[in-house]
Amino acid sequence: MPSIDFLLDGFRAFRGEYFERHPDRYGRLSSEGQHPVAAVIACSDSRVDPAILLGAGPGDLFIVRNVANLVPPYHPDRHLHGTSSAIEFAVRDLEVSHLVVLGHAQCGGIGAALDTVQGHPPERDFIRGWVRLAENSCRTALDAHDGDATACRADAERGSIARSLGNLRTFPWIASAEQAGRLTLHGWWFDLVAGALEEVDPDTGARLVP
Ligand SMILES: [Zn+2]
């Protein structure tokens, strides 16, 4: 089994090189609390850490990570809504100005959704139900691409970002904040092969960030 020591070494390096050298930063974050400008809904994939990709520091981003960076529709009930509760805190309590859905290439969660709609659902207790949120996007991508698996998956990833943006707008306090100009929604897709970032707009399609 690989050792966990490299992470503890990492913490010691952080404490010596960052925390102790920048006492003001954590001092202020501690005394004034957090005031992040943006919240990001990102995938749990180990290759797509939003803070690293976007050059953000402590206090900059409120981050929700889940399988395939999916947002469910607004559905307040007695079930356990981890993603929706984090989004609610970011929007209603922290009053972030930007909400970003950050997807990526080679997403295993979207791969599982594609397998599911093709009749091969993952034999997992929770993933199978969760990735159903991406099934419509997967069907659309499969209809558009015949045989090009890489292009199909990328389109399914982009499509599910667009769908998550649509689902965010079903939350009444997100829709009202957006209409009032207090909140802007963004969809971004990270191509970890090319090292590129695309803006995904449900109305106009995808555009490469220069
Ligand atoms: Zn992913």
Image (tube, grey):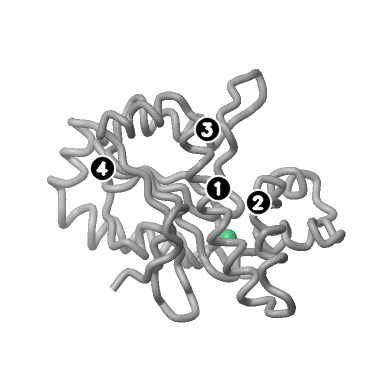
Dividing the picture into quadrants, the one containing residue 183 is: top left
167 or 85: nearer the viewer: 167
SS for callout 1: helix
Distance from disc 4 to disc 2, alpha carbons, whole Å, reads 28 Å
Contact check, label 1 and label 3, Cβ < 8 Å: no
Identify the mark nearer the N-term, 2 or 3: 3
Residue underneath mark 2: 134
SS for callout 2: helix
Residue 210 higher or lower than 25, as above or below:
below
Q: Residue at x 39, y 62 (%)?
A: 199
Q: Position of residue 136 (x, y in %)?
A: 68, 51
Residue underneath mark 3: 84
SS for callout 4: loop
Say the numbered circle drawn on residue 75: none
Residue 27 can be seen in this image = yes
Label 3 packing within 10 angstroms: few (<14), some (14-19), many (20+) = some
Give the position of the N terminus as an image quadrant.
bottom right
Residue underneath mark 4: 37
Amino acid beneath label 3: Ser
Q: Position of residue 115 (x, y in %)?
A: 78, 62
Give the position of the C terminus as an image quadrant.
bottom left
